[in-house]
Image: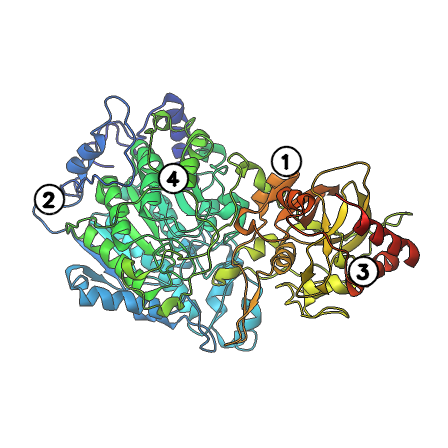
Amino acid sequence: PDQNSESPELPLPGGAQRQHAQAQARTHKTRGSTNLRGNQPVQSSRLPHRDAPPQFSTPLCPPVSPPPGRGDRRRRMAAAGAATPVGAAPRVGLLYDDRMCAHATPDGEKHPENPERLRAIRRKLDAEGVASRCVDMKAKEAKEKYIASVHTPNHIKLIRDISSKEYDYRRNKTARKFNSIYFNEGSSESAFLAAGSVIEVAEKVAAGELSSAIALVRPPGHHAEHNEPMGFCLFNNVAIAANYLLNERPDLGINKILIVDWDVHHGNGTQKMFYSDPRVLFFSVHRFDYGSFYPCEGDASHCFIGEGAGEGYNINVPWEHGKCSDADYVAAWDHVLLPIAEAFDPDIILLSAGFDAAMGDPLGGCCITPDGYALLLTKLLGFAKGRIVMALEGGYNLKSIANSLCACTKVLLGDNFTYNSPRMQPFESTWRVIQMVMVRDELKAYWPVLSSKLPDNVPLRSAPSYIEPYASSGSESDVEDVSELPDAISSVNVTQVVDDVLSKHITMLKLDEDNLATKNTSSDSVQAQDDGPVVASTRIYDLPFTWRSALSKVYVWYASFGSNMWKPRFLCYIEGGKVDGMSISCFGSHDTSPPRGTMWKTVPHRLFFGRSSTPCWGTGGVAFLNPEINYNDESYVCMYKITLEQFNDVLFQENRLVKDNSEDGKLESPSSPLIGLSEIESVSSNKALHLEPIKDSWYSNVLHLGEEDGLPILTMTCPSTAVAQHKSGELPLAPPSETYSATLIKGLVEGKQLDANEAANYISSAAARSL
């Protein structure tokens, strides 16, 4: 124990130590105490003094007002117990080992997580003269017994053996069993080196041999689960190091660890490994996008705060969309992380330092500048006596990752810097996440410091509207400076969402795990498909498709009332192509799986035919449903059970949002869904949702027609304003063309709803009636 601790304690072995720490945490949390080892700053006999980090007054966000008597505690802590004496250069460890570059794609395919990431960082640090000022360190392979503290024996055996000759002919097949993973002959050594490297630097910092350290490691780690690799990550490097300090080296006096994960993706693996452990405070700020951003898991929500003794020690700040910048992250730091970190009073900080939220990153779609990262790191230096270990996670734009990590290294070395980013404000959604509806109300029962008043009248930005994706050239992007980047860095969720529905979204992930039962009645016919559900693989590096994996697991009924009532015509929207009578072909869906079921209903909405011509069907009107319910009306709808991903693709095509790039033959389509989980919640409550980003499109209004088998029934039609324009004559009403009418008749007849004459009369009657 440190020499000024109030009551020195003998190290307790294994589980006894853990139970003792958990009992302490419960006791002190109940009393409202903020320090498991006393409320006074702890002076270490091993760590000399260091100046407090510079304080910043930025235009980003006003700081939260501290409770009485606590305002200067952070500065006192930094001045009393940081790691280097005034005037002395900090000893910053820098671990780089080229052996970790041996992990690469098996056949040289391009991939965002590639060896050049490490090399680009090292070149930048050398060129800036930064590396020579650090303590050079070499990697050591982690012992299996330390890895076993967080991973199963089968997991460890797989990673140990995957690069051996016995896997030469099945290595790729094995990789395909996992989510966003590749293996080659160098993967095993790289993974063991990465885990061992973070242990090595963490141990040196904890022992006082270094003031702080940076581990340039790959493969990254924070997605790796207890029993499997995931998301480019083979072993969970930070979790292994944290367990090592807590359980293998009690002599170092590390009893409380703050893990800060600022990677743009949620640290799902790390969260699960410490979910019930009060010795570890896990803080993750990440894009969530209502569950549609990788890793597309509901436990990235603010609702997941830990369990058992660890309740309150898991903190998620889930961004609702991309383009979050320095201002948003500083707001999360000032109003959530820093007050809680002060109360927690960690002994060391392990930083899962992903830089894929940086400007220009091809996967993250956020806008943190190098100075922004430096500022976030500076704000952490006042804790744990400045003992910070940075372990590289994500970051896939070579210049962004190199510039950002270089800026952070200079901070650890004690260099002064000026925050030169232009004046910005947080998004309204950021403030909403921080305010009562989101993080603060969930946690203030555990951290009373969060009950302090948030500032009023903070200048905020509105959420970004739908934008075209930024055409990044990926890891080889030439983007260097903030000024070179356009505003449209990445695509984001496209609709405004209801403020208070996020906590309900997890329940919306209704997976179709059962075999669809065949149901036959006199009026309904559900056709079961023999093949199982086709779920698109979730790949982090598919920026346009990060939302697709989540929505490919969510099923809805799409209710068609026009030409799509004929199944062969509807399948054009799924598989591509065209049927007789169509002048142009459909592009098809990203997921070409056929509908899981088909059934018919009638709905109390008026069918009418509007507009005067279309590119697909030529002269004549096309079908719409009046959004208003009228129980005197009855219209037929053919319902297809499809995924929410497919529904969005149909919506894109109906509104002509998919384009053929004739230069390279590739299709261009929106990179974000028009209907996600939050919009499902909204349309279910309000029965209609006019999609503001495409408000002038013909089929921009999504209706909720009820539920079937627990799944929402959705259709797309015109907004009520268009109906009013049809009534006034501002927009034309027109009977359908013969070919279009014939397609509707085929649908009604082959669906066994009407015979040919009845179907023809149904259509002509709808076309003849006035609105």
Q: Give, as a three-letter code, the residue at label 4.
A: Leu
Determine whether, in the image, residue 361 is placed left or right of residue 223: left
At label 2, counting other C-alpha atoms closer than 10 Å, the crowd grade (few under 14, some 14-19, many 20 or more) is some
Q: Which mark is residue 85?
A: 2
Q: Quadrant of residue 6?
A: top left
In the picture of the structure, the residue carrying the numbered disc 3 is 741
For marks 1 and 2, give the CA distance: 61 Å
Q: CA distance from mark 1 to mark 4?
A: 37 Å
Q: CA distance from mark 1 to mark 3?
A: 34 Å
Q: Quadrant of residue 285?
A: top left
For residue 548, above or below residue 2: below
| Residue count near mark 4 (Cα–Cα under 10 Å), binned few <14, some 14–19, many ≥20 | many
Q: Position of residue 432 (x, y in %)?
A: 43, 36
The amino acid type of the residue labelled 3 equals Ser
Give the amino acid at mark 1.
Ser
Q: Secondary structure at mark 1?
A: helix
Residue occupied by mark 1 = 685
Q: Amino acid at mark 2?
A: Pro
Task: For label 1, count other residues whose C-alpha is less than 10 Å away and answer few (under 14), some (14-19) or many (20+).
Answer: few
